[in-house]
Image (cartoon, grey):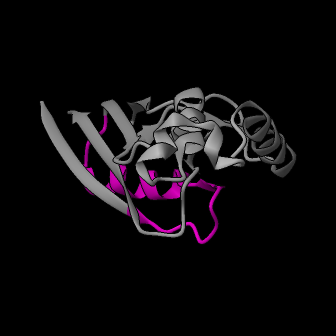
Amino acid sequence: MRSFRKELSLNVPTRRGFVNITSLVQGALRESGIREGLCLVNPMHITASIFINDDESGLHHDYDQWLERIAPHEPVSQYRHNDTGEDNADAHIKRQVMGREVVVAVTNGELDFGTWEQIFYGEFDGRRRKRVLVKIIGE
């Protein structure tokens, strides 16, 4: 069994946003040369998420609105975490809700998706460079 590791670099210019990273992950898979196995994708930051869903702007808008109702950014004083001088407690909660990582099967050198599935990076405390790990194992 072989393994391949690659870090992707992302910089979302806004506090929150969703980025389709499917093509970047597919590029890493091609680079790996692995034809059968598993591909793990996870953000290397505790205020970001990786998830799989449809690439539809209305859905992403709905996610953003729903997450802001669950864990509104302001007032920042509502969160004990922010007593440390941070202002990102809401981002930690949003990440927990949206998930840490995804694992996708690799079949015949391709990500083995269902209909409409795409991989997204969810940013909840942006405006700076962050990393995403792509780890592929297989043959």
Quadrant including the N terminus? top left
Rendering coords of residue 65 (x, y %): 82, 42
Instruction: Decide which of 15, 81 is in the foreground and name it.
Output: 81
Q: Is residue 68 magenta?
A: no
Which residue is depicted at the point 51% across and 35% down? 80
Picture layout, residue 55 above or below residue 138? below
Which residue is depicted at the point 64% across and 67% down? 14
Q: Does 99 sit left or right of 116 as displayed?
A: left
Quadrant including the C terminus? top left
Which residue is depicted at the point 34% across and 55% down? 28
Which residue is depicted at the point 58% across and 50% down? 124
Q: Does 116 sit left or right of 41 as displayed?
A: right
Can residue 109 be seen at all in this image of the molecule? no
Q: Residue furthest left?
A: 1
- Residue span colored magenta: 9-35
Q: Does 42 sit left or right of 48 as displayed?
A: left
Rendering coords of residue 42 (x, y %): 39, 40
Rendering coords of residue 137 (x, y %): 23, 34
Instruction: Decide which of 126, 22 is in the foreground and name it.
Output: 126
Rendering coords of residue 17 (x, y %): 66, 56
